[in-house]
């Protein structure tokens, strides 16, 4: 509610009409699935996200879409329903590729035993994203690509992560990547601990403050910092 009353400045951006290697992007829905119906719903959302990005009408070599599925937590490493759910997901993504082009992908990973004795995906959604980033960088990863030639995704520059109930508006991906790709919005990395450093700018573009996340994956706390920055009339350099 507080954010609605803040006056924010529009971040610098570049206009993106098509995606290149430098702006290669993967749009991904990470989710825990419990039923075939959920799998079908997620595949439909993925298809709608592609339509909003104009991908089905004009295939983009460097714009791809993926489901990143975890199986529900269990007292055992595997469940009898696992194969059914993954088979349904494979069929759903394969149908999208057959109909629209080969830029849809499916990833999953095995459950691991947590300290409480329950088997689940390591670190839940956060762990899934970290594993995906490791895979895209060619590092060791627990992810298993089930549909699509995942090697084509190696070196992807940007990952746009959506919640299961997120609906993309037309060309939203182009706008978001356009912001991230602008030189003034590039994050400054701290090589001591791998944290992302966010600089504050005044109206003249001078750096007047900075904050850091705990790791390369931004913590929720950073959002509170950004709200405060805007309330003080400051602009966040990175996005």
Image: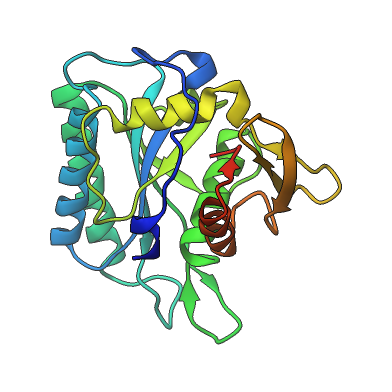
115 is higher (above) or lower (below) than 238: below
Q: Which of 140 and 32 is in front in this view?
A: 32
Residue 57 x %, y %: 16, 16
Q: Which of 121 and 197 is in front in this view?
A: 197
Labels in figure, total: 0
Residue 148 appears in the figure: no
Q: Write the residue at 54% across / 65% down.
A: 122
Residue 29 x %, y %: 34, 48
Q: Residue furthest right?
A: 192
Residue 199 x %, y %: 69, 42
40 is higher (above) or lower (below) than 66: below
Looking at the rendering, in which quadrant would you find the N terminus? bottom left
Q: Write the residue at 62% across / 34% down.
A: 137
3 is higher (above) or lower (below) than 133: below
Q: Which of 174 and 134 is in front in this view?
A: 174
Q: How is the image coloured?
A: rainbow
Residue 203 appears in the figure: yes
Q: Nearer the viewer, residue 64 or 168?
A: 168
Q: Is 201 positioned to the left or the right of 6 in the image?
A: right
- Which of the 4 quarters of the picture holds residue 146? top left
Residue 217 x %, y %: 60, 52
Q: Write the residue at 22% across / 34% down.
A: 94
Q: Which residue lies furthest to the bottom in this view?
A: 116
């Amino acid at each position: 509610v507080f954010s609605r009353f803040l006056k924010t400045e529009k971040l610098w951006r570049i206009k993106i009409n098509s995606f290149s290697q430098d702006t290669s992007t993967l749009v991904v829905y990470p989710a825990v699935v419990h039923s075939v119906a959920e799998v079908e719903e997620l595949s439909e959302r993925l298809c709608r996200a592609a339509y909003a990005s104009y991908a089905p009408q004009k295939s983009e070599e460097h714009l791809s879409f993926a489901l990143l599925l975890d199986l529900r937590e269990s007292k055992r490493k595997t469940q009898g329903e696992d194969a059914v759910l993954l088979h349904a997901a494979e069929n759903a993504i394969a149908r999208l590729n057959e109909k629209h082009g080969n830029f849809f992908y499916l990833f999953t990973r095995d459950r691991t035993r947590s300290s409480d004795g329950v088997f689940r995906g390591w670190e839940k959604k956060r762990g899934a994203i970290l594993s995906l980033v490791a895979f895209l960088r060619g590092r060791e990863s627990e992810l298993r690509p089930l549909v699509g030639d995942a090697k084509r995704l190696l070196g992807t520059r940007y990952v746009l992560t959506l919640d299961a109930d997120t609906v993309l508006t037309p060309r939203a991906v182009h706008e978001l990547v356009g912001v991230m790709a602008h030189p003034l919005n590039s994050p400054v990395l701290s090589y001591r601990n791998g944290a992302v450093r966010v600089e504050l700018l005044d109206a003249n573009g001078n750096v007047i403050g900075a904050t850091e996340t705990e790791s390369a994956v931004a913590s929720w706390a950073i959002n509170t910092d950004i709200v405060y920055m805007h309330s003080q009339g400051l602009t966040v350099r990175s996005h």
